[in-house]
Amino acid sequence: MIIGPKSDQWLNKIGIYSFNDLKALGAIPTFIKLKQDTNMKPSLNMLYGMVAVIENRDWREVAKQDKGKLLLKIEEYLEFEDGFKKNCD
């Protein structure tokens, strides 16, 4: 189990089956992939959980200390992805 039974089921649907899979892709790209490629709606708590697992921290600590930084990273990732797609068209 990576995070929890339900979260792991969601991760499996996008090809994440192990800690190494999650770490290789990263928490933010995984969170965005869940939102974009499935009909699931992962919560920010799931994002905090993925970061916590990767960094070996408590998810509540991640939520308290890193919330703003993670939201900014999501926004930056989406802007980069959008710009990349436009340049490839």
Image (cartoon, rainbow, N blue to C red):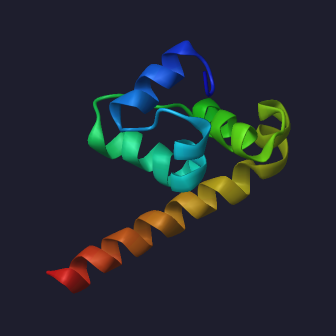
| Frontmost residue, 10 versus 19 | 19
- Name the image quarter holding the N terminus: top right
Q: Quick check: can you spot residue 41? A: no
Q: Point out residue 49 in the picture as x, y percentages from the top left corner.
A: 67, 33
Q: Is residue 88 above or below residue 39?
A: below
35 horizontally vs 59: left or right: left
Taking the image as shown, residue 41 lies to the left or right of residue 20, namely left
Q: Is 34 situated left or right of 70 in this image?
A: left
Place residue 54 in its image quadrant.
Answer: top right
Residue farthest to the top, as pictured:
5
Q: Quadrant of residue 41?
A: top left
Using the rendered image of the protein, determine whether residue 71 is visible from the camera's viewpoint.
yes
Q: What residue do we see at 51% from left, 23% from top?
A: 8
| Residue 50 position within the rendered picture, expressed as x and y whole percent measured from the top left | 63, 38
Measured from the top left, where is residue 57 in percent x and y? 84, 39
Residue that appears at 61% across and 28% down:
2
Residue 63, x across and y down, in percent: 76, 39
Q: Quadrant of the C terminus?
A: bottom left
Q: Residue at x 38, y 41 (%)?
A: 35
Task: Work out which residue is located at the far left of the displayed protein and give it.
Answer: 89
In this view, the residue in front, 30 or 67, is 30
> How many callouts does the rendering have?
0
Q: Residue at x 68, y 38 (%)?
A: 48
Q: Quadrant of residue 16?
A: top left
User: Taking 37 as reference, is 2 left or right?
Assistant: right
